């Protein structure tokens, strides 16, 4: 992506404050910010690291000010926003262009003709960020001054001036170490410039995205001093990270220049090997944590969530032939089954897992089925060790049976198979489905009873499990018959969203929501076929389809909310009341293709009609990624998390499975490749010279 001279236009500069970039370290930490350089979220940082990967996230280095001095004067390369809305200094006015490939690169054009290139990248496997500046044109007697901004806070919190912050610095040659607070990691900095220690507080940074979300929006940061670089023939280099992590990548005998050169080369090669820009986006969500390989639900504020993991894994791993990643994630989760349920969330503070999802375990079954089907379709010479695969397959099949039997017997929160074969769920004060917004004690969309997509998932689970336990086939047949007779709403030619609402027999919720599409597409086996399936797809397309995904509620519903905005109560109250969800485009497009006969021409038409909106969106918010949600009404402004795993995952599943020229029922890979050949994230090794 290049912005070029458009950045000189005021409207483009406003957009540059909204466009966000992301660099991840493969352990849950990351660096992120806006193209403009103005930090608009509390999560924007040069160094945000996970102390208990992928959790325990701390913001260590929030940002920096950069200034260059030439023969004609001093010019800023950065801009900060301060309360009550003052932008200073004027670095944005000098920003000429921006590139995202292979990592964020800014080009600055100064009034005297001096041109400077700034890069930032995060090497995989280390809590380290690397920034460089290079003189592209102009006189060689240019001086660069960089002033870091430090905190050492929880990534959800904000920082205020206090007396506990330790202002001292430990200086040893090119290395400077800061230890802001007791009990927190040290911050280590290596630079090929000279450090001047001159600590001071910078007060009242203003974060506009926090303001828009109705949250606290100001903080104070410490600038410990300044790093001075002669920016002539030599590139200015600054490497900063958690103290122990930095020592792994720059050992005592290594020069900074050669360390940065080696890390840059290795990281460039790693990214090139990943493949397309979508493969690179997908790789950001796959991380190594204390519990093993896992999947981040979204950046900047989500961790590894059960439901999100299994929905996203189908695109992020299976569609991309990342069999090893998929196996490790699924096997790790298989050990978490409890009363048929899987956790939906592991708290940031390391507390006990939260079992508040009826569908996480059912999505796990779908992911296991597609993983086993995909691996078993590989030629023998492309598979991993056969004995290991069979051992893992037994573990996964055992977890599937444990889930089905646990749900049949009955589990937490009223989850149980009813006499009609359908799955009932729900208890007061608990949000069990993916429509899980809750404010205090208010569950916005409780959906207690028998939600439509839960039945589609349950029927798929019974069919998948019946291949190992044939006795379950009769229950699947009963559930399917009950589904067709109970859920069809002839008045709207669609499906009820919930039947037996509040566990009251015969009480139905006719709200027109997108959940019904999973009865036709999005799962391995369609529950509805023929005329009913076609009518559901037509109704959903007519009332819910937008260029960025499906609305969560039809516009004619009294509860419909066209914009996702305001404070916490307002936003959570509209979260599933019209707000568009891009991940739902995957099930919809698959359903559309299925009712059109799943022909090559239908797949080509679907790609042409339905994918252009998301392709365009990938250059509008979280650059190279797809957002969590968008407004229900045009222009469908992107909202929520700008980098969302299941949104990217469903895009990849559409692109490489559903809409590929010749799909097969088990969705095997487009080309055969051994898991051992697939690149894995490896810790950044120490660089010696």
Image (tube, rainbow, N blue to C red):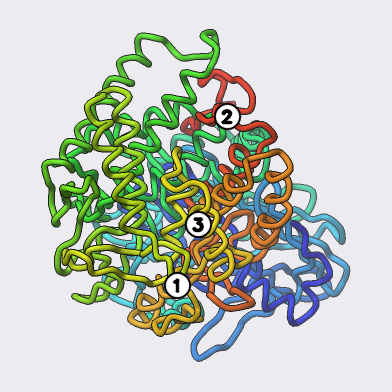
Quickly name the residue at label 1. 553
Q: Residue at x 75, y 69 (%)?
A: 95
Judge whether 76 appears above or below 119 on screen.
below
Q: Is residue 129 visible to the viewer in this orientation of the structure? A: no
The percent position of residue 121, horizontal first and vertical second, equals: 60, 48
The percent position of residue 462, horizontal first and vertical second, equals: 29, 36
Quickly name the residue at label 3. 584
Q: Residue at x 54, y 51 (%)?
A: 586
Q: Nearer the viewer, residue 149 or 96?
A: 96
Quadrant of the rendered structure where residue 194 is? Answer: bottom right
- The earlier-in-sequence mark between 1 and 3 is 1
Tag 3–tag 2 contact (CB < 8 Å): no
Judge whether 668 appears above or below 191 on screen.
above
For residue 623, side relative to residue 215 (left or right): right
| Cα separation between marks 1 and 2 | 32 Å
The percent position of residue 369, horizontal first and vertical second, equals: 39, 31
Q: Quadrant location of the N terminus?
A: bottom right
Q: Is residue 555 visible to the viewer in this orientation of the structure? A: yes
The percent position of residue 618, horizontal first and vertical second, equals: 65, 58
Q: Quadrant location of the C terminus?
A: top right
For residue 259, side relative to residue 532 (left or right): right
Counting the numbered discs, the total is 3
Q: Nearer the viewer, residue 300 or 143?
A: 300
Dot 3 falls on a residue whose secondary structure is helix
Nearer the camera: disc 3 or disc 2: 2
Q: Residue at x 62, y 60 (%)?
A: 228
- The earlier-in-sequence mark between 3 and 2 is 3
| Cα separation between marks 3 and 2 | 21 Å
Quadrant of the rendered structure where residue 401 is? Answer: top left
Nearer the camera: disc 1 or disc 3: 1
Quickly name the residue at label 2. 664
């Amino acid at each position: 992506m290049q912005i070029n001279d458009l950045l000189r236009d005021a409207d483009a500069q406003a957009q540059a404050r909204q466009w966000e970039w992301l660099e991840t370290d493969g352990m849950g930490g990351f660096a992120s910010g806006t193209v403009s350089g103005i930090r608009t979220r509390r999560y924007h940082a040069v160094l945000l690291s996970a102390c208990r990967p992928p959790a325990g996230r701390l913001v260590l280095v929030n940002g920096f000010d950069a200034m260059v001095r030439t023969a004609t004067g001093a010019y800023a390369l950065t801009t900060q926003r301060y309360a009550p809305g003052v932008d200073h200094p004027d670095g944005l006015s000098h920003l000429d262009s921006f590139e995202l490939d292979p990592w964020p690169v800014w080009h600055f054009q100064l009034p005297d003709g001096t041109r400077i290139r700034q890069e930032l990248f995060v090497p995989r496997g280390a809590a380290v960020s690397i920034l460089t500046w290079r003189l592209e044109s102009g006189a060689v007697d240019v001086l660069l001054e960089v002033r870091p901004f430090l905190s050492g806070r929880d990534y959800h919190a904000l920082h205020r001036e206090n007396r506990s912050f330790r202002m001292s610095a430990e200086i040893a040659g090119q290395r400077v170490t800061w230890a802001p607070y007791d009990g927190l990691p040290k911050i280590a900095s290596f630079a090929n410039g000279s450090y001047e220690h001159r600590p001071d507080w910078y007060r009242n940074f203003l974060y506009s995205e926090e303001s828009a979300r109705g949250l606290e929006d100001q903080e104070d940061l410490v600038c410990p001093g300044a790093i001075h670089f002669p920016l002539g023939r030599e590139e200015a280099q600054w490497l900063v990270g958690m103290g122990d992590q930095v020592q792994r990548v720059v050992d005592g005998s290594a020069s900074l220049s050669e360390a940065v050169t080696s890390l840059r080369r290795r990281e460039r090669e790693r990214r090139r090997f990943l493949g397309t820009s979508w493969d690179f986006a997908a790789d950001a969500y796959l991380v190594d944590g204390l519990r093993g390989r896992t999947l981040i639900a979204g950046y900047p504020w989500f961790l590894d969530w059960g439901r999100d993991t299994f929905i996203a894994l189908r695109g992020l791993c299976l569609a991309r032939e990342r069999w090893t990643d998929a196996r490790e994630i699924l096997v790790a989760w298989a050990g978490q089954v409890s009363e048929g349920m899987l956790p939906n969330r592991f708290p940031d503070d390391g507390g006990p897992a939260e079992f508040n999802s009826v569908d996480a375990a059912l999505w796990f079954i779908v992911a296991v089925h597609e993983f086993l089907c995909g691996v078993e379709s590989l030629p023998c010479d492309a598979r991993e060790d056969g004995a290991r695969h069979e051992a893992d397959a037994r573990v996964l099949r055992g977890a599937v049976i444990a889930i089905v039997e646990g749900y049949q017997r009955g589990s937490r929160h009223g989850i149980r198979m009813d006499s009609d074969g359908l799955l009932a769920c729900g208890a007061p004060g608990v949000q069990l489905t993916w429509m899980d917004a809750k404010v205090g004690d208010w569950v916005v969309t409780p959906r207690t009873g028998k939600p439509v997509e839960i039945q589609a998932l349950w029927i798929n689970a019974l069919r998948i499990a019946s291949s190992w336990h044939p006795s379950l086939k009769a229950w699947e047949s009963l559930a399917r018959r009950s589904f067709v007779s109970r859920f069809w709403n002839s008045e709207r030619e669609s499906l009820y969203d919930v039947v037996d609402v509040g566990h009251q027999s015969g009480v139905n919720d006719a709200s027109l929501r997108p959940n019904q599409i999973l009865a036709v597409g999005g799962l391995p086996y369609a529950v509805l076929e023929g005329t009913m399936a076609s009518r559901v797809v037509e109704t959903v397309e007519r009332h819910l389809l937008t260029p960025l995904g499906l609305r969560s509620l039809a516009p004619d519903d009294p509860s419909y909310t066209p914009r996702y905005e305001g404070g916490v109560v307002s936003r959570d109250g509209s979260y599933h009341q019209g707000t568009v969800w891009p991940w739902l485009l995957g099930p919809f497009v698959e359903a559309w293709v299925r009712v059109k006969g799943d022909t090559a021409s239908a797949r080509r038409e679907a790609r042409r009609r339905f994918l252009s909106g998301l392709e365009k969106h990938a250059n509008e918010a979280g650059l190279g990624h797809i957002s969590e949600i968008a407004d229900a009404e045009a222009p469908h402004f992107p909202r929520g998390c700008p980098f969302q795993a299941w949104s990217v995952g469903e895009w990849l599943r559409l692109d490489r499975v559903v809409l590929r020229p010749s799909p097969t029922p088990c969705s095997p890979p487009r080309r055969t490749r051994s898991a051992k050949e697939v690149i894995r994230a490896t810790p950044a090794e120490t660089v010696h010279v």
